[in-house]
Amino acid sequence: MKKSVLSAVMVMALLMSAFAFLPAAFSANPGPPPGGVSMWIEPDTLSWETSNPPPGYTFKVYIKCEIASGVDTFAWQFYLTYNKAQLNATAAGYVGADGTEYAPGAGKSEWADGKATTPVTFSKGTHDATLDYILLGESLTSGDKITGPGVFRLAWVQFKIVGFPAKYETLTSELRLDISKPGGFASYFIDPNLAELPIAFGKATYSFKWTAPPKPDVTVDPVETHFYKEPPPSVGKTFNIKVLIKNLDPAWGLHNATFDLFYNSTLIGVVSYAFDTLWSGPNVFDNSTAGKIHVEVKNPTTTPSGTVNTVTITFVVLYQGAYPAVDVSPLDLQNVHLFDTLAEIQVSTITDGKVVIEGLLTLPLPYLEVSSVTMGPEPVLGKEFNVTVSIKNLHYAWYFVGLDFRLSYDPTLIEPVAVYQGPFMPYWSSQQNGSLGTFWYGEIWEDGIYGPHILVGNLIYPNASGRWNPPWPEGEGVVAIITFKVIYQPYGLGQNSSLLKIIEQRWVGLDGPETQNIVDILPADPVNGVYTIRWNMFIGRVIDLYGGAVNEGYGTAHGYTYNGTGVIWPAPFGGQGPNTPMDLVVPQSQVWLFANVTYNYWPVQNKIVSFEVQDPRGNVWAKLTAITDKNGVAYVTFRMPWPCENPESLFGVWTVKATVSIGDVVVSDTMQFHYDYMVHIWKVTTDKYEYNHCEHVSITIEYGSHAMQTYPVLITAVIKDDLGVPIGFASLNVTVGGAVFCQYNNNTITLTIHIPKWAYAGIATVHVNAYDKEPFDGGQAWCPEYAPAPKILILPY
């Protein structure tokens, strides 16, 4: 009696996943014997390669049958065996008349043709040490039958590949239906009388072949190492080079690798090396021959795959020429061989490297300059004055970030009052994206090994990640302002002088914009200042004309008032001193004029002072008088004219003259000032004329100012497209000032605007303006918009 999986109640509980399968053949039907049935497997040929396995390493086969004419069938069962070292059956179910593949324990086969069936059980178990099996069947209810002829789909079976071929090997096996397990399990069909029908079986062959995966690549990493011309020198700098195996498929089973790396031993030298921890060795690193390194690595601890490092070599730069020379050391890979345990693995591409060493560019040396100050001859005992310490001649390629210095002085003549940070370092910090500001240290040291001196430290902070960003500080500017007080002034004729001397200094920069290691900068000798105090108590009659202007409120902020009245700009910007010019006055500003009348430095009271104001063409605009007060000071005020027609014709150098009679002798002082816009936009250009959508427009703006004091300027650029739509905006806050009287101080900036995809094609215009601050925050324009607005073409393709 044959054992069967058919029973009154059959339970199946397996999970199944559907995977696509490309059949190799469907010709496995052996045909039914007379009065019987055939059963076979489709496809009958199952063949894959390691380079192109089935998705997820799973596939399905299908069990079919053919019933001879006039043959009645009542039930069927298949007993499918396979090589369990190569495959594992994971699920099985019926294939219905419409091709539906039912899950285990669900649905009916095409053979049942919609008739009632008894529940069945899918079973799976070990056949022997080599084979495993899967058992599935189906039965009609009592009294029913299926009569041939006909070809029917019975079931599907899902397999997972569990055995993999070794390199250069092909695994083969068979899937069979006609093998009986000892004890009675078999594949069969029975008729309604439960008699077994004659049956013919088909089988399927299975193969899985190892095939070579894509070839790996070998490369020097990085391909190029570059040392630039800017100081500090590159000699002595170290750098790392790796030799990588890339795109390595684990199917290669890489076991060992060897190569030679050639280099220019006069330019670079080997410092050290380190094998990647993947290689257990014994490994070889031989650089006994100048300019050649031989490397062998072997016995990986895991199967190498992807990007694999062989060795990291640390080199040092031995030679750097002089700019503009450029030396190149090759990093050439030769004799590259990769092996598994059986044969050599071919390499797809080999990428050499190189080390480029630009000749050293000799940069100008920066230095510190201390301002000189002369006090007197008028009485100045107890008066305060400022001394500035400025950076000069700084080249950006020093990648300067900070300095400290000590400034000595003569404590018998002057004493320090306070130390302030100058604008140079905060300005460059504000230009560097992400900078956390500046570190400032200023302290008065009255004694010690250096004697009385001022100690100053100033550093630009990096960003939160510890890196500095361009632009790098350059040019010149004030780093410290020291306020001193005069503590000694003798009487008589003559003068005393002493040095304001830098007695110690240290400058620090970076070794490069990428590596950013801190290095010392060797500056040139400082230019020391001189403090001079003059005395001459008998200078007689003097009138000193000076003043200031409101200048949209910024001039007021620069200056101070006289007894709460007017505005006076600090010397020398207010015109203090004989025939000294005053700073710039902007259109329609209120101007204040003061005259200090003295005789041998003593104020002369109740004297009538005459003031006359003339434009650049000699036209008189005002004749005014005022009477000196107890301090010998007289003052007047007026507002600058701005006529309806051609008001800019009044721009230029205006002249003010003040006169007074002291003891029947008339004395006078003349003061000039520029009447002008705060800033002029001289030129606006773009980096090209034609642009595609999504490109960036680089806008270069040249501007200048007559201002000697500093003023804020917000420079803006707007692009309007062919239909007048604003498509992009950019702005930058700058500072103008530092001009010499009768000369413009000019500068250049660059703004960048993106052209959006939605901008209308055609002629676009660039509109550039200058404000004191954002108009939304109450800002106003310092000058008219640059005209005519430059044009660009936004291309229609």
Image: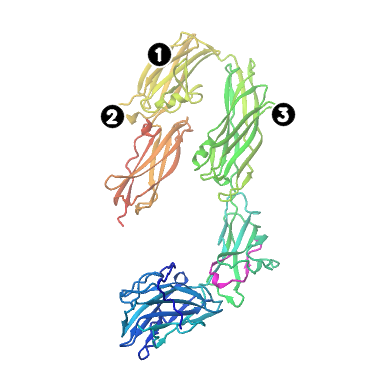
The residues tagged by marks 1 and 2 sit, at their Cα atoms, a distance apart of 30 Å
For the magenta stretch, what is the residue range?
244-267
The amino acid marked with disc number 1 is Thr
Q: Mark 3: few, some, or many residues within 10 Å (few <14, many ≥20)?
A: few
Q: Are marks 1 and 3 in contact (CB under 8 Å)?
A: no
The amino acid marked with disc number 2 is Glu
For discs 3 and 2, the disc positioned in front in the rendered view: 3
At a point 64% along the width and 66% down the height, the residue shown is: 279
Q: Residue furthest left?
A: 723
In the depicted view, which residue is nearer to us: 488 or 440?
440
* Mark 2 element type: loop
The residues tagged by marks 3 and 2 sit, at their Cα atoms, a distance apart of 68 Å
**Does any portion of residue 524 appear in the rendered image?**
no
**Does any portion of residue 734 appear in the rendered image?**
yes
Q: Quadrant of residue 329?
A: bottom right
Residue 43 drawn at (x, y percent)? 41, 80
Q: Mark 2: few, some, or many residues within 10 Å (few <14, many ≥20)?
A: few
Q: Which residue is mark 2?
A: 645
Q: Which residue is mark 1?
A: 625
